[in-house]
Amino acid sequence: MHEACCGENRIKVRTDEEKKALINRLKRIEGQIRGLCAMVEKDAYCPDILTQASAAAAAINGFAKALLSEHIRTCVAEDVRQGKDEVIDELLGTMQKWMK
């Protein structure tokens, strides 16, 4: 059993390594967003800004995919093993919101 899962408290205890990897991804995305702001401030050419915006969107999707994968491997799998099938509906709802 993976003791780091959500449970009733709706928190996820992550290892230092997991936190570091997620935070590093977010900091890179933050840098990309700051770069986009700088491009707008410097009147960069629209297609150049759009290319960078696309890269930032892909990075956010990559972050979400990594987080979703970990959630499925840990919290969802544990809850299903414990007979808490409602976690599947929660997962489907989360994925529908994410895929809009």
Image: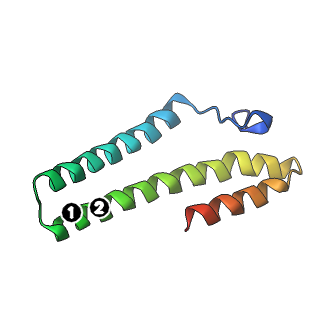
The secondary element bearing badge 2 is classed as helix
**Measuring 52% from the left and 57% from the top, which residue is drawn there?**
65
Which residue type carries mark 1?
Answer: Ile
Proximity of marks 2 and 1: CB atoms separated by less than 8 Å: yes
Question: Is residue 1 visible in this depiction of the protein?
Answer: no
Residue 12 at least partly seen: yes
- Residue 23, image x, y percentages: 43, 37
Q: Residue furthest bottom?
A: 47
Residue 76 percent location from the top left of the image: 73, 51
Label 2 and label 1: CA atoms lie apart by 6 Å
* Disc sitting over residue 26 in the figure: none
Please give left or right for residue 33 compared with residue 85 in the image.
left
**With 28 as the anchor, is 3 left or right in this view?**
right
Q: Is 24 drawn above or below residue 59 in the view shown?
A: above
Q: Position of residue 91 (x, y in %)?
A: 70, 58
The answer to whether 42 appears left or right of 53 in the picture is left
Q: Is residue 75 left or right of residue 44?
A: right
At horizontal 80% and vertical 36% (from top left) the residue drawn is 8
Q: Report the amino acid beneath label 2.
A: Ala
View extreme (top): residue: 16
- The residue that mark 1 highlights is 49
Q: Is residue 49 above or below residue 11?
A: below
